[in-house]
Amino acid sequence: MAATDTAARPAAAERRTAGRSANDRARRRRRLGTAGFHTGAVLLSALWLLPVALVLVTATRSFDDIASNGLGALPHSFTLGGFSQAWTDGGQGRALLNSLIVTVPGVLLSLGLASLAAFALSRYELPGRRTVLLLMLAGNLLPPQILLVPVSKLSELLGMYDSLYAVIGVQVGFGVGFYVFVLHGFMRAIPREIQQAAVIDGAGPWTVYTRIVMPLTRPALAALSALAFTWIFNDLLWSITVLRTDSRMPVTASLIGLQGQYVSAWNVIAAGSVIAAAPTVLVFLRFQRHFVAGLNLGAVK
């Protein structure tokens, strides 16, 4: 018995040593994997932020500095004159106001109409509701290029051509289908017992919509608001399709004119690009928490 115990001790010690070695190797692999992941994330972030940093630096340099030292050289000056020139002489201030006039009503109308349609399609047994939903979604699958001429002709027939109302109408018409599809999924997941209890208490459809369904759909609405603001504000195609007057152009279309007006003044062009990008960045930062919450809620469902 003693000989057996004596022989078993070295074997147990070898097993413990082998186990510790395996654990050490596993920890090293995890540390190497973590270090590799963070290194890759830092490199990708730097690669993505490099053009943004170049635009910001170029926007704060003077024209003489860029002309003397080159666009890719280190800055030798700091000035905000490019922003002032782009805002006043380049017309970015007026164009930014036009974009907001189009974007804010476009977002409110799109989400308002989409929420009403999604509420009806998701909470009530309407005949053909699945067909209506699929038709709304199918409209967003059409390439917008094939609709440029019909949209332009239709805006002329309605007397809305070359007006911001035409841009708002186009943005609402082409955005409602997608927003209905998304909101329909969120509203359909709300338990019907909540609605039934409200109906028993005497609540009508409008009360159920405003007091129950809409508050519960707030994360989805916040996420869609951020997306809709970005899409409408950054749109270029429909603006140049239904608008012709320079004073009515939004900020994206105005950037094209700015590049033609200041061909070699890269600081003014960069400043105009920063002005055009600032509102969408601010909106995303403001709604970032709600945007992430809406995406996580949709992922869980």
Image (cartoon, grey):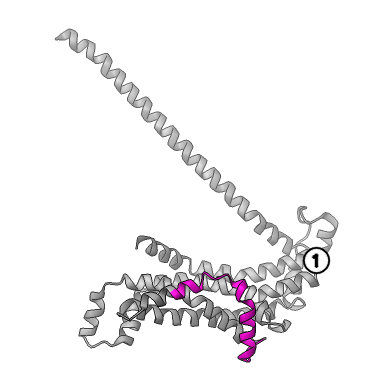
Q: Residue furthest top?
A: 3
Magenta residues (range): 135-161
Dot 1: element: loop
Q: Position of residue 25 (x, y in %)?
A: 41, 29
Query: Disc 1 marks which amino acid?
Result: Ala
What residue is rendered at 74% in x and 78% in y? 88
The residue furthest left is 1
Task: Locate the N terminus by quadrant.
Answer: top left
143 is within the stretch colored magenta: yes
Which corner quadrant of the image does residue 135 belong to? bottom left
The image shows residue 122 at horizontal and vertical percentages of: 34, 76
Characterize the magenta stretch by its predominant secondary structure: helix
Residue 214 in sight here: no
Q: The C terminus is located in which quarter?
A: bottom left
Mark 1 nearby-residue class (10 Å; few <14, some 14–19, many ≥20)? some
Q: Where is residue 182 in the image (x, y as percent from the top left)?
A: 42, 70
As rendered, which of 284 and 78 lies closer to the eye?
Answer: 284
Residue at mark 1: 265
- Relative to 24, is 298 above or below? below
Left or right, 27 with respect to 271, comes to: left
Q: Count the marks: how many?
A: 1
Q: Residue at x 28, y 88 (%)?
A: 204
Q: Residue furthest bottom?
A: 159
Q: Which residue is at the front of the view, 89 or 174?
A: 174
Instruction: Let me know if residue 71 appears in the view.
Output: yes
The image shows residue 291 at horizontal and vertical percentages of: 45, 66
Closer-to-camera residue (122/35): 122
| Frontmost residue, 205 versus 147 | 147
The picture quadrant where one finds residue 156 is bottom right
* Side (left or right) of 281 relative to 274: left
When asked about the image quadrant of residue 200, the answer is bottom left
Magenta stretch contains residue 156: yes
